[in-house]
Amino acid sequence: MEHVLEITDLKISTLRGKETVPLLDKVSLKVGRQQCLGIVGESGCGKSITASALLQLLPYPLSVTGGSAFFTASSQARMDLLTLPPKLMRGIRGREIAMIFQEPMTSLDPIFTIQQQMFEALHFHYPHMTHADRMDKSLSMLRKVNIPRPEQTLASYPHQLSGGQLQRIMIAIALMNNPRLLIADEPTTALDVTIQMQILELMNELKETNDASVIMITHDLGVIAETSQHVAVFYAGHIVEEAPVNELFHHPQHPYTKGLLQSISSLTGDSRQLYAIPGIVPPGGSWAAHCRFAARCSHASGRCLTDMPALTEAAPGHFCRCFLHSQEVEA
Amino acid sequence: MSEYLLDVRNLKTYFPIKGGLMRRTIGHVHAVEDVSFKLKPRQVFALVGESGCGKSTTGKSILRLIDPTAGQVIFDGQDIAALPQEEVRLLRRDMQFIFQNPYSSLNPRMNVWQLLSEPLKTHFNLPEWEMHKRVEAMLDKIGFTPDQLHRYPHQFSGGQKQRISIARALITGPRFVVADEPVSALDVSIQAQILNLLVQLQQDMALSMVFISHDLNVVRFISSEVAVMYLGSIMETGPTQDIYAQPRHPYSRALLSAVPSLDPQRKKVRHALQGEVPNPANPPTGCPFHPRCAYATDLCRRQRPALTEQFGRMLACHHPLED
């Protein structure tokens, strides 16, 4: 299969005093054409910084300390996003790779109208476009994302619109230059379920009509089930499980994934006791040298407390980072 | 004494909109519009709905954290809505509030001991040793050890902070609590721990609870009765299991079908909603849901449906969904 993006051994660290603290550890991922890759994990697991690193948007003192991320642009040129000079990166951002942020209410500028903000995205990449063309393009994008009364919306300021409308405008701006890859960082977390459903269906549809690939970053397994073809589960700065979506939901292998699915499905069942993973999510950087989930795992024993398991193939295309699983295979 | 601990009757809370040069009141936001429900002792009653539907305002109006505009809140035979604030304050040892965000609801300058003994100092006149006894008993219930007594909120994780704010609400031994989205700020793996703790404490302490949430799965787990709110009014209320199994109001059905399924192969039958929630300062005429409802008729546009008993539950709809 053709891959739009191939991330290999991506490492991100931060500085704490003079000490370098790792936040993301050897993450490798691939995104296929017209595919949606889901990244799921809890706060501090490194899912959002992975996205920021791809666009060279990591805030100081975070920095990439290793790995590569090869992206195939629409011109078929292959480039490493992590080492791309800033000038070339600016041509990629918003044109080849677009990003949708978590909170539409804070990521649009309150002092500019929607029209000014949509035109800016066009002007940056196509400075010679005429006003009439920009107007046509903006209106057609707003219609595409089901904004009622697009002419009126263009003249509005962000505070005059609702959260669902703003998120649709964010998607319209992101898709305006027909990007090859769309990175959506918790695009529906701030929205209500009925609006969430509209946005997810819209994204699924646009993926096909615009020939775009998507990276969907979320903490909500339900959103993953609705949108993704392939899923990577992050825990404490690395991937603990990776599989095609049906495989992951029906045959989860890692105790963490199993626990997450179990606690959600016991929520929808009729029991009066929820399955809960004990303990707390380890804060970034303070990870054990052995299996990082061992402290919360009910199956942890011997080797789990001394060694770090590798990400091994449990079934075709299904990778899991757990000793228990590899023992089963050996036995 | 009636069989109900709490009886909310025709509760209305309006917020004035000020405008113009003289800052005169030019209109009202109808945050809570005619809400009525009853709560039995030891029952968990959930208010569910989308943001801006008035569920939190309803919870706060019940405890008089916001003064309601009209209606009665009868707690234990006494109308709280009509009491002067000083008397409400005395009642608060019996009725408490658990806030959504433990990061902002705990004072960062107070340690666990100060946070938990403050409600005791406010409501009881206890000797120091008695306060210590109660605080330590409460710590044990939330799974803390006594050596954590002198730590400050920033030394705890989000889930632990929420445990502290639950302890702070329950230390006075209330009979009734309003929990406003107590798990929505927490990670998925921590949510289950806190929900289990809440259920356990609710049973141990014989608590009655109004549980406010936008998360339909959480509501299904924790409550025995539920009220679905939209634009300040209750659309449908009754036993949680019945409503989840077969919603009769078009809005409840749309809301329930919008929850993502956990099976990527089974795509749910969608009952998509068009448009967005109208502005509560200028609510539609007739049924508040009619502009987005597929079944709306002329009657819905003219006349607001009353909450009446149908299908073994209370329903406010002119055209309820049949079998």
Image (tube, coloured by chain):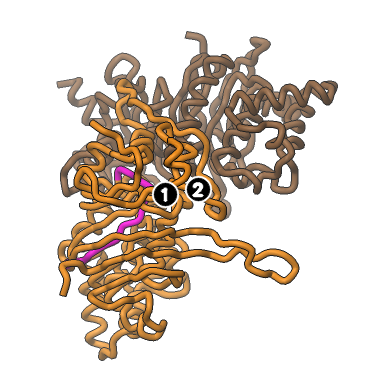
Q: Which quadrant of the structure image shows residue A323?
A: top left
Q: Is residue B216 magenta?
A: yes
| Marker disc for residue B304 | 1
Chain assigned orange = B
Answer left or right for A253 relative to A118. left
Q: Position of residue B116 (x, y in %)?
A: 33, 75
Decide: is B297 above or below B101.
above
Q: Residue at x 27, y 67 (%)?
A: B7
- Residue assigned mark 2: B285
Q: Position of residue A95 (x, y in %)?
A: 68, 23
Q: Position of residue A283 (x, y in %)?
A: 42, 50
Residue type at tag 2 = Thr
Give the letter of the chain under mark 2: B
Image quadrant holding the C terminus of chain A, namely top left
The span shown in magenta is B206-217
From the viewer's side, name the closer residue of A62 and A144.
Answer: A144
Q: Residues within 10 Å of mark 2 (few under 14, many from 20)?
A: some
Give the letter of the chain under mark 1: B
Residue B1 seen anywhere in this rendered image of the structure: yes
Chain assigned brown = A
